[in-house]
Image (tube, rainbow, N blue to C red):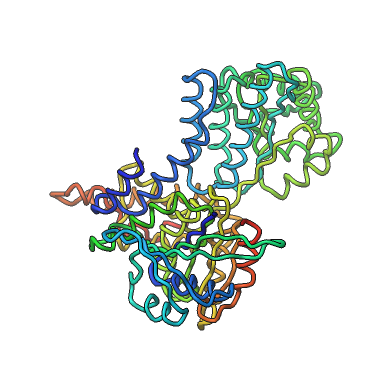
Amino acid sequence: MKSIIVLGQTNVGKTLFTLNFADFLGMNQLTITFQNRERGSYSRTLALSEAQALLVSDNLHHTQDIQSIVLSLPVGKSEKQFEILDTAGLSDGIHHNEQIRKAMAQTLRYIRQADIVFHLLDCKKIAETDILRGIGEIDYQIAQFGQIKQGYVILANKIDLPNSQEGLNKIYTEFPGNRIIPISAKNKNGFKEVRKFAKQLL
Amino acid sequence: MDKEHVIKQVENGEISVNQALSIMRKTTNSSVIKVGEQPTQSDQVTQIMRELDCLIGLDSVKQLINEVHAYVEIQQKRMSVNLVSEPTVLHMIFMGNPGTGKTTVARIIGKLFLAMGVLNKGHIVEVERADLVAEYIGQTAQRTREQLRKASGGVLFIDEAYALARGGEKDFGKEAIDTIVKTMEDQRTNIIIILAGYSKPMEEFLQTNPGLKSRFPIIIKFPDYSTFELFRIAEMMLQQREYQLSKGARRKMFRLIEELKSGNMENFGNARTIRNIIEKSIRRQAVRLVDKSNISRTELMEIIEEDLSEVENI
């Protein structure tokens, strides 16, 4: 089974994207496997609304376990199963909180194994803060890492918010030569294209 | 380095996520490259490829060089088991604005093909029109042959190659081109010729000399660096000289690069402009500190915002 890893800075919308993308692909109930560092892995089946309430938050570094969901896509006449890994956000430098460092380390463990990278960027944040903070060095590194993967795409998120267009333009100039899909994880804009992209690679 | 070890270091807060990612990426890459008969040769090649990999940006260029490297290697392997192997024509065309890394990459190519046994010296001879074209009839061929002889066993790097076609049919530049092409046919191996220059006149040059395109099968385009890449180049250059930017200077440098990039691109020399800025700021810092007593080590290393004022007018 191929795996897609969702990467990005903290609070860029990785979890919301993952859950809503699962919903978009027609999953009513999600069986989510959590890879917890202390408790090992355990699964839980949740309705979408429950999952959203539980897992999505405005707080930074909310996601600290790798959360994986098995999804399927119709390819030709059959269904192709794949795994989507929602990860803890990465950030530049050394984080002072040990829990968060451990969560990031966990993300690094999974980066190697994944076949496809979905890299989320926050258009609004990039438009409103200066480029050094909006796009981190980490983002350029993820982009470089993506080049050695089977598939790599930038999902320019939060296009539903005002000012996001400016951020989107910056993304286009900073990451030339990469596939960039503008999306709104909240309103599920651009998901068709994401599905098409995934389909080609699975 | 072991991957789990790297990740443990992140957990313990010993290295940043950035450092970990770059280590992980490099170790992944090197496993792709290692091939080759004799260990010494492949070690050298791996090291050169790593040197290439350490250049900032230039992703498409790196990929192409990787392809060329793999192609040559496989052709050599095929030859060793008596399979039909394509003759390796490795003459190249480099297109891109000034300061985008053309000469640097040409140097690496010389070293790479030396290590792979394609060239026996691997040095680079940089020439331009004036080094090839003479004033009087009959002398151009001689002068061009002289340069070709000097470059034999290495790389002949012809900068602003389109200048050779500038004068039209009667110009001696054409004689230089003809001499080069003839040498390429007589001496098929042990020299790599690179025609370099700005993208647009280069395209025109190739269109007016259709025979050249097939003789220079490898075309590499050098894109302009992005703002962030230029910023990292600046940081790297300072690091090599054992200087560093203060917090304020970092911001200032970034703004400066953004301004330069959004301004008139014609006069903007990419990494070369950045180098000039850095050298100027280092001189500024020296002037600022020279009359001070008790200068600390940090002060000696640090470039502050003030050192970067008006450095762009170079």
Q: Is residue A82 above or below residue B68?
A: below
Q: Is residue B72 left or right of residue A35?
A: right
User: Could you say where residue B222 lies in the image, as x and y percent from the top left?
Assistant: 61, 46
- Residue at 57 percent across and 31 percent down: it is B109
Q: Is residue A80 above or below residue A27?
A: above
Which image quadrant for residue B193? top right
Tag count in the figure?
Answer: 0
In depth, the one of B41 and A114 nearer the eye is A114
Find the residue positioned furthest to the left: B294
- Residue at 71 percent across and 61 percent down: it is A76
Q: Is residue B115 above or below residue A123?
A: above
Q: Is residue B149 left or right of residue B37?
A: right
Which image quadrant for residue B161? top right
Residue B186 in view in this figure: yes
User: Could you say where residue B85 lies in the image, as x and y percent from the top left?
Assistant: 73, 23
Residue B255 in view in this figure: no
